[in-house]
Amino acid sequence: MKYNFIKKAISLLLFVGLTSFSFAQTYWQQRVEYTMDIDFNVDNHQFTGTQTLKYFNNSPDTLDKVFYHLYFNAFQPGSMMDTRSRTIEDPDGRVRDRISKLDDSEIGYHKIKSLTQDNKDVIYKIEGTVLEVKLAEPVLPGSATVLNMNFQSQVPIQIRRSGRDNAEGIDYSMAQWYPKMAEYDDRGWHAHPYVGREFYAPYGEFEVNITIDKKYVIAATGILQNPNEIGYGYEDEGVSVKREGESLTWKFKAEKVHDFVWAADPDYTHKTAMVNGGPELHFFYQEGAKTKAWDKLPEATVKAFEFIEENYGEYPYPHYSVIQGGDGGMEYPMATLITGERSFGSLLGVTVHEALHSWYQGVLGFNESYYSWMDEGFTSYVQDEAIAYVRGDQENPQKGNYLSYTLLTQSGKEEPMSTHSDFFTTNYAYGRSAYTKGAITLAQMNYLVGKKTTLRAQKKFYNQWRFKHPDANDWIRVFEKESGLELDWYLDFWTNHTHTIDYAIGSVSEADGNTTVTLERKGNMPMPMDVYVTFADGSKKIFYAPLVIMRGEKENETDLERVVLPDWPWTHPTYQFTIDSPINEISSIVIDESGYMADVNRANNIWEKE
């Protein structure tokens, strides 16, 4: 009897212990340390590289394989990117059928010459843009392994993001240019083939040494470690630098980044500007008649950085570089590649947008394939806020996003925001979903929880999740805690469906000296109601009907008197409330005067006394 009691007690303790462990999983993420030496031949646009990669398995899983991205392999006739571009309904105008027409000297490629794990040969094969590696020894949880690689690569003609000889004459735009370890997280490996969309990779450190013809100037991620050896930045100070041979080695180091970009051109002009308290901004471009707008760019960019840091969080790196190159605008850690022959307005817009990706990708590291709307959307939202500040605009800077979104809902092309970036049926649907509807995801929070709460919550989200790869649930939980409201319904309706918001004032009638207003939910997505009533004497009140599923109400951030009405159950298509005034004392009734609710038909939001 005593034995059975002890046995049961032990079993209970084991159960409690195991249960506690299963419900107490701690946050983890993988980590990488790259050391790369690159020998670049500008005559044939090829380079050889050695890569030492220390990979830290911080997951609870044993790994017997790893995956690398080989992005340059996309620029070959018949690749997945090529085929996708030639078969999608609305191909990217920069790509179209151009890859299919590349000859052997114009394609891109990565050839793996050797690969070992802790000095042991591994089995590997290349499948398009992915290198599949079966490890010689499993990598246990909490341990690390070292992978050594020798590779040879050819830079493709500039088509999409990376390449040589871009349309503005920049020699090399070196983005996604090296064999890059794929991300492994709690959802497993993310070794998606490259068909032209987004990226996701582990954080770590990069030491990159690039040997190239000495006539070239290099701009890159990270901090240049040997400016005095190559004379870069010292010529104007009268320093005598001895340059031997035909080439120079540029040495860069970057910490807490998930990628490394560089660009090279013999005709770069380099200018700097300092943000108050840092960082130092660097601008690399070809001076000429078509790049006059760059003269005004440093001052405006400093102003934008100061606004963003004050309102949305501190930029954590000492440098940021704006580099002419690429095929439009594309963000990378501590740098961006942008085409530079633009008007000042266009140049400022693309610069601020790509710089903001340092916050909403560089520092937060979203899985862009699944959360492109967080990456592009949050960036687009804050871009509009920052540009409005720089220009001194007073109107709602998000108006354009709301108009663009309404057009999307009318197009018949909309797909759920939760769609994997590569799997959208059209480029139009992807772009409007990621940039436009993504921006409204955050903008609409001004309506749901209030502007002050939104600003506090967005900054808190950034500070809390820096360098941790947050997802949509992590984001909405910060807003829930800051507002005291339940908001998971918003995330579900808005991101997993294409339901639209359409509320109307159905009728306004009078009885016994009171006015009864009937509201109608015509769209499939529910929202709380801010109804503004303006009286004949010019006074105004807000009648606020929260949703039942919010479990609370937002703060009243206005100076107006607000009447909090009973909750509106989302299942009910109509809702009535009473105004303690006769109808002839009311001038107008308006649903959402702020314009922050994404109502697709605002014409039925207004009642005015005839």
Image (tube, rainbow, N blue to C red):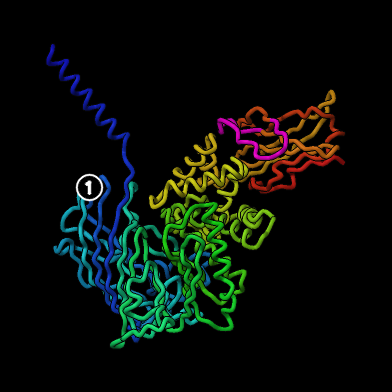
Q: Quadrant of the N terminus?
A: top left
Q: How many marks?
A: 1
For residue 554: magenta? yes
Q: Relative to residue 554, is residue 284 drawn left or right?
A: left
- Magenta-drawn segment: 545-563
Residue 46 visible here: no
Q: Quadrant of the C terminus?
A: top right
Front residue of this view, candidates 206 and 105: 206
Residue 278 visible here: yes
Q: Residue at x 84, y 32 (%)?
A: 583
Q: Residue at x 31, y 76 (%)?
A: 210
Q: Relative to residue 383, is residue 216 drawn left or right?
A: left
Residue 321, percent across and down? 46, 69
Q: Which image quarter: residue 431?
A: bottom right
Say above or below: 238 vs 194.
Answer: below
> Which residue is farthest front?
238
For residue 139: magenta? no
Instruction: Please state which amino acid type lies under the numbered disc 1.
Output: Pro
Secondary structure character of the magenta stretch overall:
loop
Residue 383, percent across and down? 57, 59
Front residue of this view, candidates 95 and 68: 68
Q: Residue at x 63, y 44 (%)?
A: 501
Residue to which mark 1 is pinned: 141
Say above or below: 543 vs 355.
Answer: above
> Which residue is farthest bottom?
245
Residue 531, percent across and down? 71, 38
Q: Which image quarter: residue 529?
A: top right
Residue 109, percent across and down? 33, 74
